[in-house]
Amino acid sequence: MESRRIFMIVCLAGAWFAQNNTIMDAISPKIYHLGHMKQKIAQLALVVNDYDEAIAFYTQKLRFKLIEDTRLSDTKRWVVVAPPGDYEGCRLLLARAANEEQQSRVGNQTGGRVFLFLHTDNFDRDYQNLLDQGVQIIREPSVEDYGKVCVFADLYGNLWDMIGPRVMFDF
């Protein structure tokens, strides 16, 4: 009987704290300072001409991992890829253009600006991979305040920045 009473008190206290956010406010005011929400961008849709050619480019040339390829209908698939080593971060949903308006956006989703930013822990390794795979380099590597960067185009012409850590000392 006593354990049941303690359990009821703990449940009531927990419900009160959850309703009033008191524990969260006390534990981590910095994390929960914006209305107690935690959000992230999980996926970006990238409009493509063809699922299979897009999968081949991203998995073979950029070495992304195919996370999911689920057939939803005769004409639609749910295709998700992610960069190597970051399968829980932001992913790309490869979405086949379904009409003329969407088709007009393939390769130009941002009006000619760089669209996506691929960070790497080893710029030279990954830049050499781009060259070896015949990926179109739009702007050769340069060292900027934020790191080493180049611009490349995907198979449709979307522009990407590839950014590596800035090397402070060259020996």
Image (cartoon, rainbow, N blue to C red):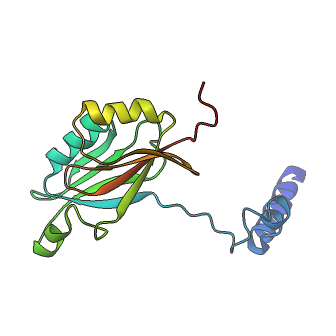
Image location (x, y in percent) of residue 157: 22, 56
Seen as rendered, the residue at the extreme top is 171
* Quadrant showing the C terminus: top right
Tell me the residue at 19%/63% (across/down): 106
Tell me the residue at 30%/45% (across/down): 68
91 sits left or right of 107 in the view: right
Labels in figure, total:
0
Q: Is residue 74 above or below residue 143?
A: below
Seen as rendered, the residue at the extreme front is 171
Image location (x, y in percent) of residue 99: 11, 71
- Quadrant hosting residue 39: bottom right
Image location (x, y in percent) of residue 53: 15, 45
Tell me the residue at 34%/39% (across/down): 64
In depth, the one of 170 and 62 nearer the eye is: 170
114 sits left or right of 50 in the view: right
Image location (x, y in percent) of residue 153: 27, 51
Tell me the residue at 28%/59% (across/down): 46
Seen as rendered, the residue at the extreme right is 2
40 sits left or right of 150 in the view: right
In depth, the one of 53 and 146 nearer the eye is: 146
